Amino acid sequence: MPRRWVKQVAYLAAWLAAAALLGMFFGAPAWWLTAVLLLYVAHTLRHIYLLDRMLAGGKRVGPFATRGLWAEILARVDKLRKKSRNRKKKFHRVLREIRESTGALRDGGVILNAANEIVWFNPAATRMLGLDPRTDLGRRIDNLIRHPQFVGYLAEPGGEGISIPSPKIESGWIAVQIIPYGRDQSIAIIRDVTRETRLERTRRDFVANASHELRSPLTVLSGYLDTLADDDDLPESWQVPITEMLRQANRMTQILRDLMELTRLESAEADAGHGFVDVCSMLKLMVRDFGTVTAVQPALNLRFETDAALLGNETELHSIFFNLLNNAVRFTPASGSVEVVWRPDAHGAALEVIDTGIGIPEEEIPRITERFYRVDPGRSRATGGTGLGLAIVKHALQRHDGVLQISSVEGKGSTFRCLFATDRLVFRGGRAEAAV
């Protein structure tokens, strides 16, 4: 038992002993003991009253208002009150700084609970979404932002977010990213991307118009060069330059075709449609065609582990498979091999193109789907590459709700994996086809 409590018990015992002695001397000891206990109860109630005043926010009890055990208790309570006041001041200061800092942010922030109800938002969110703190707190955010793409993203947030038309800014666009945190809470980061969207649209329109305008003069040049190349009377000194010019003209034509295809994919609707595409037949024909192009190329192997077909755009899927296979063949030596596998996956199905080619440095992998990006520019040009194939693959896959995964070891080979979701698959029944 603490010393202060020992002293308090001893103090009460001394008063009771004194009362008993006085009762024995004057008579009626029970009355004396009762009187002492009543005085002790009154003393205790007085200090409980003082404690209640302190806890209710009253002034601190003076040093002479009490003493002993109660003085220590009241002093400790007063110390706890001071700590609580300091913490409260610190909390308000931090809260004020947070409000000032979030108010200065150009990006909007909206805190949501587990039911996607708005808990808090900053002034930037008010400006970009038209939120009103007097009426919108506690409302579901999808009742205020009704864009179908946002509603779908809200149900399954993740990734880099989405871009949608702004509900408040006229002809504006906003990027929304939802980040879960804490216990069943999330924060929606809203950024005004109107300028970037307009610049991207301008760039896309320029590329499309330039590509379209360049096709006609390039077709004329290619026609004349074809005629000159087939002319038996062409001087020998002109044959090499004409052949090289024709090769470069054909390469330029292919670049323009890829640019126009990429622009079309970027400008098209997000969904590629749900036409029936027989993947097995498409891959068989493609591998057979590649095998007849030239004898000096790596061995091509095709294996089916599922007979699933896809729902999508046949032209775009053909472009995806062709570009991946074409890249693998171009960057794999004749002594190597390229394997194409169509197999089931945990979330649907996957097309894998596995080569034993030159491989890709690990630091280059995140960038190889950028347009015109080449790991080895000299070799890419020498083999006729445009630098747009993987960019086309990426955008076409996105339109089919697919994901491109790339793994590679420099000098040993690469694996390009296209993942398709289950809702894009059609099974015709029966067992998977045998390996080809």
Image (cartoon, rainbow, N blue to C red):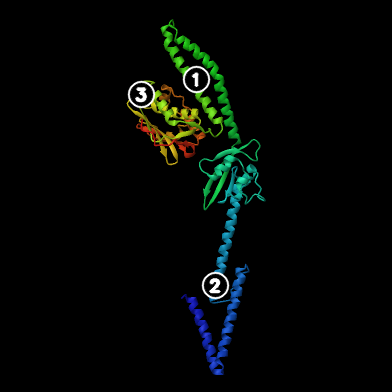
Q: CA distance from mark 3 to mark 2?
A: 91 Å
Q: In the displayed structure, would residue 27 be above or below residue 347?
A: below
Q: Earlier in the sequence, mark 3 or mark 2?
A: 2
Specify the amino acid type for callout 2.
Ile
Judging depth in this view, the residue of 41 and 407 nearest the camera is: 407
Residue behind mark 2: 73
Label 1 and label 3: CA atoms lie apart by 24 Å
Relative image position of residue 143 (x, y in whole percent) = 62, 46
Q: Which residue is located at x 63 percent, y 36 percent?
A: 172
- Is residue 231 positioned above or below 147 on the image? above
Q: Quadrant of the C terminus?
A: top left
Residue sitting farthest toward the left: 335
Q: Amino acid at mark 3?
A: Gln
Labelled disc at residue 253:
1
Closer to the observer: label 3 or label 2? 3
**Of tags 1 and 2, which is closer to the observer?**
1
